[in-house]
Amino acid sequence: RQLADSLSDLTATPPSAPSTEAQALAHYHAALAHQASGRVGAAVRHFRAALALQADFPAALCSLARAQSSICDWSSREATLVSVRASLVRQLDEGACPALQPFDAFAVPLELPLVLRLAQAHAAAAEAVAASLRPLLPPGGLCHPPRDAAAGSGAAGATRLRVGYVSADFGDHPLTHLTRGLFALHDRSRLEVFCYSLRQSDRSAPRAAVESAAEHFVDVCSSDSAAIAARIAADGIHVCVDLNGFTSGAMTELFALRPSPLQVGMLGFPGSSGGAFLDYLATDAVASPPQLEHLYSEALLRLPPSYLVTDHAQTLLHCGILPPAAVSAAWLRGGGGGGAGGGDEGGGGGGDSEGGEGWGLREILRRRYGLPPLGVVFCCFSQLYKVDPATFAAWLSILRRVPGSVLWLLRFPLEGEANLLAAAAAAGLPPERFRFSAVAPKAAYVARASLADLFLDTPLCNGHTTAADALWAGVPLLTCPGDAMCSRVAASLCTAVGCGPQMIADGGIGDYVERAVRLGTRRVELLALRRKLWARRLSAPLFDTRLWTRTWEHALRAVWLRHCAGEPPASMDVRLGELEAAELRRENAADALVRRARALQAGAVLPAGLQPPAGLQPPRADTRVAAGCCAAPNDGVT
């Protein structure tokens, strides 16, 4: 309806011609409607039309930058980004809330102090909204629970620590894919957990899982921020956790109302809120090293070894991931040069309609998906807004130096494919060196990802859930960390899985390229890294949800005790006590035996010649469509 109304405004013939400002606004709203409908190219055209009519239109300018980034339209990128930065600085200097959204800044190369100023401006806007809502609060304001140091101690008769999680993403969303095991594994003898949903149910299985796992699941999607704050306060929440930050559907003003005595940012937004209303930010020593602590408004809760909780070991154990044993000797030899053409290329012959001589299940599946059976398959399944020209240039350099290799990317959004292929062609690389995937359900996507050889991370803004998915699928990952938290998440994950030195290119983009070329041309070394990752997969802290949950509970208890002592929030390195750690090791050892038995029973470890599991069956209608990516577009953890 919004699109129709906006286009009607543009084509109507009123008694008097509309003002230039009105025409620009009509183009802007038409662009937003096109963007919401997935027609990003059309949105770009309308944003440009709006700016042509009204050059000083910060909202249209920032929206144009975001839309262009999302489809890798780099035709005017440098000029647009210069204008975005100038507009941002001017608005900040004038004391206005900038049109640039903090989440969109992840894809803009800004200096980090300026990024913090941007967050602080949006936090101040949330504080202003909260001030206008205070008259709607109950008489006397919001009451907080008393400073009871025994809360959450587990002692006889002690009050449980009440923890509230607030999110608009309880559903089929990467955040819920990561956290649903957390809610199930919380220690109910010490914690009483509340989940407050800001968005109505999507009736998905992940949503149902959280509703079932949480002790209290409260749907507040029809309530305003003041009413939600009053409900949280009435529930006596000790620590309230913001799972959104500056992402879609968030109610930042809710936290500015201060419904609980302690408030923590976690997962959804990999950066600082800039506001005094969040006391702590859950992070780790790799994602947020101590020397960069001045770039955060919150005290830092550094969790070991990674702040990213996962649920892969519970929900994706039996999805049909191919183990390193599925890598054939034919691939290891290089198959006479591999072949970037996929399908029938890659050597072998032998007259076998299912594959060439020495081919195994992995090569057969690759052929069915249009991947080169014996070539090196680089991949990246992050959303395309994370791909900038410098990253793509690095990828092209890698492809040129690794004969027969291909790059497997995400077709998300669809219009990005043509732009990237055009950029590659302009640099001298044909479309045969690329594969683009369609979307697929989570389990199928993770299983299919195991057909790849090396995941190339995006340095400007890393893969988050997608990087964890790749590691769980047994695919080695290469990342090049920057200084921003969003550019260091993959390094955190690689460290947590025990492969940091092999997977983190800490020498810059040149080091990143050289490492990728080395692994792509030394297949024995690449396979050894894959085997190392696979060997650590079921025991690594990254995928140990119970360990993460106990550590997180320890952190919540620590910040509560500090509050009870009257001490202000302070950064801390969270560590489990020796007795707790020993108990967890015993529990996890027993769990590991059960998981291994179940994995063998489910056929996750595939002997040669077995038919592919259901999650890996390719769509026969289009053999050029390779693995997809789960979830719809989102602006949270991806």
Image (cartoon, rainbow, N blue to C red):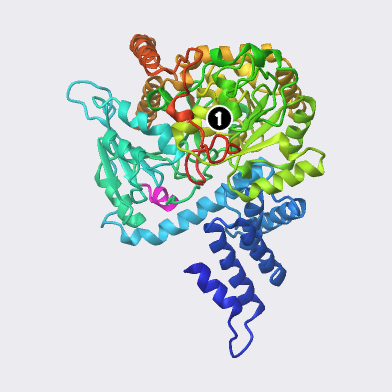
Residue 269 against residue 372 in the figure, above or below = below
Q: Quadrant of residue 578?
A: top left
Graded by Cα atoms within 10 Å as few (under 14), some (14 to 19) or many (20 or more), the crowding at tag 1 reads many
* Residue 202 on image: x %, y %: 36, 48
* Front residue of this view, candidates 53 and 596: 596
The residue at 47%/21% (across/down) is 611
Residue interval drawn in magenta = 252-258
Relative to 45, 181 lies left or right: left
SS type, badge 1: helix
Residue at the farthest bottom position = 15
Q: Label 1 sits on what residue type?
A: Ala
Residue 288 visible to an observer of this rendering = no
Query: What predominant SS class does the magenta segment belong to?
Result: helix
Would you name the residue on which mark 1 appears? 467
- Indicate the quadrant where residue 528 lies: top right
Q: Is residue 191 above or below residue 537?
A: below
